[in-house]
């Protein structure tokens, strides 16, 4: 009996879009092989009424999938790259990073126009501390409202609410066919994206050379280099969804990679933002160097204060 290769994925609409995209690409490149998708429920899918920053961020959307990959129950794990921890579990590796979608965050509004057009004190929803910090830095008068759920759920909650605006990632909204809901792209000068935002990662077992060969055929080298730099930056700062960190790497026509990164206070009153560039072949070094630049400016203390504030808030909720 020929081997059937199993692709593990979360069950959300976006996760399944990504898994089906990967499966279609694999079928195109390896038409004689069989593939199927297995849906795996994760902690992040189970806890829907609490902010992610208050329940921890180590593998919320990946741990159960990675356990199945380690056990051999699945052969490929397909993730939104921004959900992956910066260090891979034992025996696992990122076999490929697919070509990145537009990495911007986007603004959806009932009022129309851009964030600049919102009235004083307008209510804007986001489930991200990174977005909250940056938007409050730009518009400190806004009231930020916590929102959870997948893309369709957040859009429904927004439509049924008295909220004035909603911030989401372009990639998810576009991939699911909600492009007409976008009021506008938020420029990077206002909001840097999450590390890996817009990219799809294919995680595999280190020891499975057959799967590695297939995964590598889907790898987009420029995207992988950019992600490598961004993840090195995040790893050095020991960041995740519990602290406001953003980064974006771009490779120019001369093969130079520019990485821009930010850390901030939760209320946006302090934002540290720096950039560093070098040959794209030194992607990881660029990420580490940029992190060190921010650490020298006080980023570690800033992030520690943010973590303490989130932990205090979480304990208050438990009480």
Image (cartoon, grey):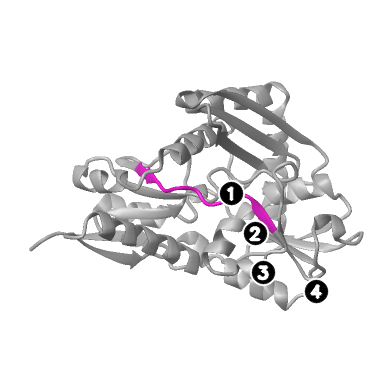
The numbered disc on residue 103 is: 1
Distance in Å between CA atoms under marks 3 and 2: 11 Å
**Which residue bears the numbered disc 4?**
162
Query: How packed is label 2: few (under 14 Cα within 10 Å), some, or many (20 or more)?
Result: many
Q: Is residue 213 left or right of residue 200?
A: left
Q: Is residue 211 above or below residue 221?
A: below
Residue at disc 2, secondary structure: strand
**Which residue bears the numbered disc 2?**
168
Residue 205 lies, in percent from the top left, at 28, 45
Q: Earlier in the sequence, mark 3 or mark 4?
A: 4
Q: Residue at x 20, y 60 (%)?
A: 31
The numbered disc on residue 181 is: 3
Residue 38 in which image quadrant: bottom left
Residue at disc 1, secondary structure: loop
- Magenta segment range? 94-106
Camera-side mark, 2 or 1: 1
Q: Is residue 29 left or right of residue 304?
A: left
Q: Residue at x 60, y 46 (%)?
A: 194
Q: Is residue 10 left or right of residue 278?
A: left
């Amino acid at each position: 009996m020929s081997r059937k290769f199993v692709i593990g994925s979360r069950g959300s609409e976006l996760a399944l879009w990504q898994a089906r995209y990967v499966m279609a690409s694999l079928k195109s490149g390896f038409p004689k092989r069989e593939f199927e998708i297995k849906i795996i429920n994760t902690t992040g899918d189970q806890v829907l009424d609490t902010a992610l920053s208050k329940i921890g961020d180590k593998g919320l959307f990946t741990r159960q999938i990675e356990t199945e990959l380690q056990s051999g129950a699945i052969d490929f794990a397909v993730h939104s790259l921004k959900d992956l921890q910066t260090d891979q579990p034992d025996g696992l590796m990122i076999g490929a990073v697919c070509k990145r979608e537009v990495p911007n965050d986007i603004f959806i509004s009932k009022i129309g126009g851009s964030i600049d057009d919102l009235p004083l004190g307008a209510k804007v929803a986001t489930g991200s501390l990174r977005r909250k910090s940056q938007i409050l830095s730009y518009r400190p008068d806004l009231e930020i409202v916590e929102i959870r759920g997948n893309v369709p759920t957040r859009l429904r909650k927004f439509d049924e609410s008295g909220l004035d605006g909603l911030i989401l990632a372009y990639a998810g909204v576009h991939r699911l066919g909600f492009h007409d809901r976008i009021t506008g792209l938020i420029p990077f000068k206002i909001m840097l994206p999450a590390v890996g935002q817009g990219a799809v990662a294919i995680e595999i077992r280190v020891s499975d050379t057959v799967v590695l060969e297939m995964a590598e055929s889907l790898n987009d080298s420029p995207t992988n280099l950019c992600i490598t730099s961004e993840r090195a930056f995040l790893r050095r700062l020991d960041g995740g969804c519990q602290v406001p960190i953003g980064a974006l790497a771009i490779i120019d026509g001369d093969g130079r990679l520019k990485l821009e990164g930010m850390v901030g206070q939760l209320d946006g009153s302090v934002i540290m933002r720096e950039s560093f560039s070098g040959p794209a072949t030194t992607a990881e070094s660029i990420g580490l160097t940029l992190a060190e630049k921010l650490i020298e400016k006080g980023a570690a203390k800033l992030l520690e204060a943010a973590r303490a504030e989130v932990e205090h808030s979480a304990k208050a909720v438990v009480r």
